[in-house]
Image (cartoon, helix red, strand yellow):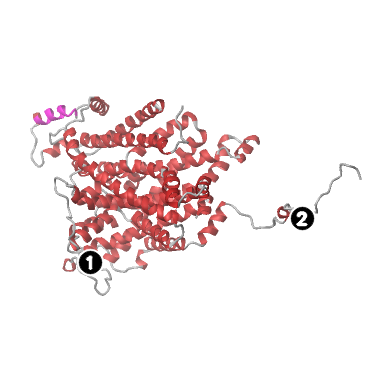
C-alpha cells in the first residue's frame, strides 16, 4: 500500500509541473501591461514603473519568471497580488468559504442522489424511475447559471424565502441555496450512476444467494446491493469535489459568495498573472490529492482491488 | 450384435434438436443494427432527433422562421416590453425582438458545438488510439499529457485563453479555447475501449495473417472501439454549447456584436427583477438544445452497449 501511494505521488509530479507551466504560459501571453493598468489614466513615473517591474520580476524572460515563481512555491510562498496582499492571505480568507460551500453541496448531492438512484434502480421501469430519468436529464441540460438565476428569482425575489446574495461572513443558512444550485448537476449524475450500478449489482449471484439464504430485503439492499454499487459513485464524488472547489466560479459570482471562485474571476479580469496561477495551482493540487484519496478509498470499498505491486 | 454397439436415441428425442432448428437464413445482426432496432422503439430518441433537426434547420435558414431583423429596427420605447403583434416573445432591454434574436443566435451555438467536437475528436482519436493500442512508454507519455490538460477545468482554462485572445473574439477562437482542454475525455474513453478490444481473437487472427500493426489499428481495432466515442462526442457537443454560453455570460466569450444566447443572457441578468422573461427565454432555447443532444447521447449509450441493453 505504501509503495502504491509512493508511486501515485511520483506520477502526480510531472502532471503538476506541466499544469503550472501551461497556466503560467497562458497568463504570460496575456496582452497589455498589467502595471500600466494599475495607474489608470495617469501617466506613471518611469522610475516607479521600473522599480515595480523589477519587484515583480516582469523585466525577466518568461522562463526565469516561471522558475522564480516555482522556487517560491516550493518554499510555500505563493507571491503577492498586485493590490499588495499576499496570495496566501487571499487564499486563507476565501478558501474556507468555498470549502464550506463545496462540502454542503457534496452532502446534498450524495444523500439525495444515492437515495433517488437506489429507489430508481430497485424499481426499474416503474413511474418513479421514468420520472427520475427525465428530471435528471433536464438538470444535466440546464446550464448552472440558468439554475442559479431561476433559484434566485423564485426563492429570492418571488417567494422571498431566501436572500438573493450572500453576506460577507457567508453564514451556513445563507449558503443553502447556492449549495443546492451547485449540487443540482452532480445530483443528476449520481442518480444515473447509482441507478445503473444498482441494476447491475442486483443481477449478481451473491445477491441471489443472500436472498436464498433467507435474508430480509432491508438487510440485502443496504449491505449487499448498495455497498457494492457505490464504487463508481465514490469515483465520481471524488472528481466532483475538485470540480466543486473550482467550478463554483459562476455560482459564487451570481450569489456573491466571498469564495475563491469570485476572487479568481476578479484576478483573471484584472490580468493578475501570479494570483491566477496561485489559485489554479492550489486547485490542481487539491484535485490531484482528492483523486489519490479516491483511489485509495477504492481498496476499502472493494476488497477485490489489491495494491500488492 | 457386438458388445460395443450401443443404443443411440433418435435425433428428435435429444435436446440437440434445438441446435439444428437455428435458422441459418435469419437476418444478420451486428452492433449497429441492434442499436438501431433499440433506438427505433424509444420515444426519447425521436423527441431529441426531432428537436436537433429543428435546431439545425433554424441555424441554417433563420430567415424561414422570422422576418424581423434581430439587431436593427430596435426602439428603446419597447425596452423590456411584453409580447406585441408580430413580436410573440416581447422585447429585450434594447427594444429588440427576443424571438428573432433567439432564432438568429442559434447558428452561433451550433457552430461552436460542431467546431469543438471536430477538434476534440481529432485530438482524442490521435491520443486515445496511439496510447491505447501501442501501450508501454507511448501510453505513459500521451496519458500524462492528457492528464495535464484534464487537471485544468476547461471553463477556467477557456477564461484564461479568452482573456489572452481578447482582441480576437470570434466563434473560431472560443471553439479553440474550449476544445483545446476538452479533448482528454474523448481520448480516455477511446483508450479504455481499445484496451478492451485489442486482445480480441480477431486482432490476433489479423496479426497471424501478417497485417501490419498500424493497419490492424486502422481497419480492425478502431472501427470496433468507436461506439463509446460517438456517445461522448454527442455529450461533448452539448457541453461545448453550455461552455460558450457560460463564457459569454461571464463576459469573456463572444464579442457583443455576435448574436448568441449567452450574450443575451449576460445582457439580461441585471434586469432579473423587473423583466425575468428577457433572461428566461434565451435560457429555455439554450436548455432545450442541450437537452436534445444530451438525451441523444444517453439513448445512444444504452443502444450501443449490449450489456446496458440487457439490464434495462
Which quadrant of the figure contains the N terminus of chain A? top left
Answer with left or right where residue B266 lies relative to residue B5.
left
- Name above or below for residue A288 compared with residue A199: above
Quarter occupied by residue B124: top left
Q: Which residue is mark 2?
A: B13
Quarter occupied by residue B292: bottom left
| Chain under numbered label 1 | B
Name of the residue lying farthest toward the bottom:
B85
Q: Which residues are magenta?
A: A48-57
Q: Answer whether labels 2 and 1 touch (C-beta < 8 Å).
A: no
Q: Secondary structure at mark 1?
A: loop
| Chain under numbered label 2 | B
- Does residue A16 appear in the picture of this structure? yes
**Where residue B79 sits: x, y (%)?**
18, 66
Q: Secondary structure at mark 2?
A: helix
* Residue toward you, B94 or A284: A284
Q: Which residue is mark 1?
A: B91
Q: Earlier in the sequence, mark 2 or mark 1?
A: 2
Total number of numbered labels?
Answer: 2
Query: Are both tags, 2 and 1, on one chain?
Result: yes
**Where residue B250 sits: x, y (%)?**
24, 50
**Where residue A40 sits: x, y (%)?**
11, 41
Question: What's the residue at 14%, 37% (across, down)?
Answer: A36
- Does residue B148 appear in the picture of this structure? no
* Residue toward you, A105 or A49: A105
Question: What's the residue at 61%, 37% (across, down)?
Answer: B204
Amino acid at each position: 500500500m505504501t509503495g502504491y501511494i509512493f508511486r501515485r505521488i511520483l506520477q502526480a509530479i510531472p502532471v503538476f509541473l506541466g499544469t503550472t507551466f501551461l497556466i503560467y504560459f497562458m497568463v504570460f501571453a496575456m496582452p497589455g501591461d498589467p502595471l500600466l493598468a494599475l495607474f489608470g489614466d495617469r501617466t506613471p513615473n518611469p522610475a516607479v514603473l521600473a522599480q515595480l517591474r523589477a519587484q515583480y520580476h516582469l523585466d525577466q524572460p518568461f522562463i526565469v519568471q516561471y522558475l522564480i515563481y516555482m522556487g517560491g512555491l516550493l518554499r510555500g510562498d505563493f507571491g503577492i497580488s498586485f493590490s499588495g496582499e499576499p496570495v496566501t492571505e487571499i487564499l486563507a480568507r476565501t478558501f474556507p468559504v468555498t470549502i464550506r460551500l463545496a462540502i454542503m453541496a457534496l452532502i446534498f448531492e450524495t444523500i439525495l442522489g444515492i437515495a433517488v438512484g437506489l429507489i430508481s434502480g430497485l424499481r426499474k421501469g416503474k413511474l418513479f424511475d421514468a420520472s427520475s430519468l427525465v428530471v435528471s436529464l433536464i438538470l444535466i441540460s440546464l446550464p448552472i447559471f440558468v439554475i442559479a438565476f431561476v433559484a434566485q428569482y423564485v426563492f429570492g425575489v418571488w417567494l422571498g424565502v431566501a436572500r438573493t446574495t450572500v453576506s460577507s461572513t457567508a453564514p451556513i443558512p445563507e449558503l443553502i441555496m447556492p449549495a443546492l444550485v451547485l449540487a443540482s448537476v452532480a445530483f443528476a449524475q449520481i442518480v444515473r450512476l447509482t441507478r445503473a450500478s444498482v441494476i447491475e449489482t442486483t443481477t449478481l449471484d451473491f445477491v441471489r444467494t443472500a436472498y436464498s439464504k433467507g435474508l430480509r430485503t432491508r438487510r440485502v439492499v443496504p449491505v449487499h446491493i448498495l455497498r457494492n454499487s457505490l464504487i463508481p459513485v465514490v469515483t465520481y464524488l471524488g472528481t466532483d469535489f475538485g470540480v466543486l472547489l473550482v467550478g463554483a466560479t459562476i455560482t459564487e459570482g451570481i450569489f456573491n459568495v466571498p469564495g475563491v471562485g469570485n476572487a479568481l474571476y476578479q484576478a483573471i479580469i484584472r490580468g493578475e498573472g501570479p494570483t491566477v496561477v496561485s489559485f489554479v495551482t492550489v486547485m490542481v493540487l487539491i484535485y490531484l490529492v482528492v483523486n489519490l484519496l479516491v483511489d485509495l478509498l477504492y481498496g476499502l470499498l472493494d476488497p477485490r482491488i489489491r495494491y500488492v505491486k | 450384435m457386438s458388445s460395443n454397439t450401443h443404443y443411440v436415441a433418435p435425433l428428435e428425442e435429444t435436446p440437440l434438436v434445438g441446435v439444428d432448428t437455428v435458422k441459418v437464413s435469419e437476418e444478420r445482426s451486428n452492433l449497429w443494427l441492434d442499436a438501431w432496432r433499440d433506438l427505433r422503439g424509444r420515444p426519447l430518441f425521436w423527441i431529441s432527433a426531432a428537436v436537433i433537426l429543428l435546431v439545425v434547420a433554424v441555424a441554417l435558414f433563420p430567415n424561414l422562421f422570422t422576418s424581423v431583423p434581430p439587431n436593427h429596427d430596435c426602439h428603446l420605447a419597447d425596452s423590456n416590453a411584453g409580447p406585441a403583434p408580430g413580436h410573440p416573445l416581447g422585447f429585450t432591454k434594447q427594444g429588440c425582438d427576443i424571438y428573432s434574436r433567439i432564432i438568429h443566435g442559434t447558428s452561433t451555438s451550433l457552430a461552436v458545438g460542431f467546431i469543438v467536437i471536430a477538434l476534440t475528436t481529432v485530438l482524442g482519436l490521435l491520443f486515445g488510439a496511439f496510447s491505447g493500442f501501442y501501450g508501454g512508454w507511448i501510453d505513459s507519455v500521451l496519458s500524462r499529457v492528457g492528464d495535464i490538460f484534464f487537471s485544468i477545468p476547461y471553463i477556467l482554462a477557456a477564461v484564461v485563453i479568452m482573456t489572452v485572445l481578447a482582441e480576437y473574439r470570434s466563434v473560431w477562437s472560443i471553439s479553440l479555447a474550449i476544445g483545446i482542454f476538452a479533448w482528454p475525455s474523448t481520448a480516455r474513453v477511446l483508450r479504455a475501449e481499445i484496451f478492451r478490444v485489442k486482445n480480441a481473437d480477431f486482432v490476433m487472427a489479423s496479426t497471424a495473417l501478417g497485417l501490419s500493426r498500424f493497419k490492424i489499428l486502422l481497419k480492425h481495432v478502431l472501427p470496433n472501439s468507436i461506439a463509446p466515442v460517438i456517445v461522448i462526442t454527442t455529450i461533448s457537443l452539448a457541453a461545448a454549447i453550455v461552455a460558450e454560453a457560460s463564457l459569454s455570460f461571464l463576459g469573456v466569450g463572444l464579442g457583443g456584436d455576435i448574436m448568441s444566447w449567452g450574450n443575451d443572457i449576460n445582457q439580461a441578468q441585471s434586469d432579473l427583477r423587473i423583466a425575468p422573461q428577457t433572461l428566461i427565454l434565451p435560457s429555455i432555447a439554450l436548455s432545450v438544445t442541450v437537452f436534445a443532444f444530451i438525451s441523444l447521447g444517453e439513448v445512444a449509450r444504452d443502444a450501443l452497449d449490449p450489456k446496458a441493453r440487457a439490464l434495462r
